Image (spheres, rainbow, N blue to C red):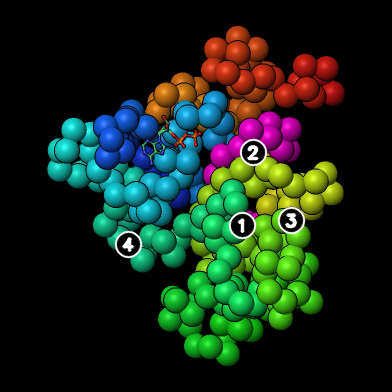
Amino acid sequence: MADESSPIPAVRVAGLVYEYPDGRRALDGVNLTIAPGESTALVGPNGAGKSTFLLHLNGLLPGRRALGRRASPSVWIDGLDASRAGAAVRRKVGLLFQDPDDQLFSTTVLEDVAFGPLNLGMARDEARRLALECLGRVGLAEAADRPPHHLSFGERKRVCLAGVLACSPSVLVLDEPTANLDPRGRRRFMELIGSLPATRLIATHDLEMVLELCPRTVLLDAGKVVADGPSREILGDEALMEAHGLERPLSLVVGR
Ligand code: ADP
């Protein structure tokens, strides 16, 4: 039983193995526990398994075991088995994709943001009210009636974030949130993410952002966690970073 000194983890992953249908093993025994409210970065070279890992957190990929063996639970969100709890887990985990165009499909911004709450069973008026409120939180209330594809890339990212927030997730999972943003858009997006109270897991190559937003870093390579600890220690370890195809962030090299 959990007590106050050991709350139920927001995320618990135990021995997660995943092979794509072609037999490629993308995750090779990942163990990870994230406490409620923690802000954690997931870093690693291309192909390390980061995206595959994120997709397991809301049950988008089945909890399939290697070699066709029967599934056994390996991912829990707030104590719920992610491979079985379906909608209940998807409701808890807000996944922000790297490319906003993978997430936006409605004819207006407001409809897009209201889609999640409507899908969760909220009444139309209430969903629209909530969508407007969430658009306000990302500074886009005035764009509510515009088609998403008329907005800039940075604005579309913020619409997606509003859509995620509208579902009130307890865990925010962000895939490369600052990729392809200009410096002002990046700064604005970082401030938004930093202001959110949810548990956060951020997969990224933006290591300066990690230093600002994530006290903890998990380094994944070849489907395994190879390091897990304070971000400044992991990202400042030149040998470790180089061994896994990464570079220390400049601010740690020049000692800012
Ligand atoms: P990352 O997000 O860290 O770049 P991915 O999770 O995308 O890593 O990929 C992990 C491994 O899984 C890579 O070897 C990649 O080639 C492989 N992979 C990703 N998607 C598929 C797929 N749909 N089918 C087969 N292999 C895949």
- Left or right, residue 133 beside residue 112: right
Mark 4 residue crowding within 10 angstroms, few (<14) / some (14–19) / many (20+): some
- Left or right, residue 129 beside residue 105: right
- What amino acid is at disc 1? Pro
Kindly identify which numbered label has been placed on residue 100: 1
Provide residue 157's location: percent of width, then percent of height: 67, 57
- What amino acid is at disc 2? Cys
Q: Quick check: which quadrant has ligand 1?
A: top left
Provide residue 172's location: percent of width, then percent of height: 55, 53
Residue 38 in sight in this render: no
Question: For mark 4, what is the residue?
Answer: 86
- Left or right, residue 96 beside residue 213: left
Q: Quadrant of the C terminus?
A: top right
Mark 3 residue crowding within 10 angstroms, few (<14) / some (14–19) / many (20+): many
Question: For mark 2, what is the residue?
Answer: 214
- What amino acid is at disc 4? Gly
Provide residue 184's location: percent of width, then percent of height: 84, 49
Kindly identify which numbered label has been placed on residue 154: 3
Mark 2 residue crowding within 10 angstroms, few (<14) / some (14–19) / many (20+): many
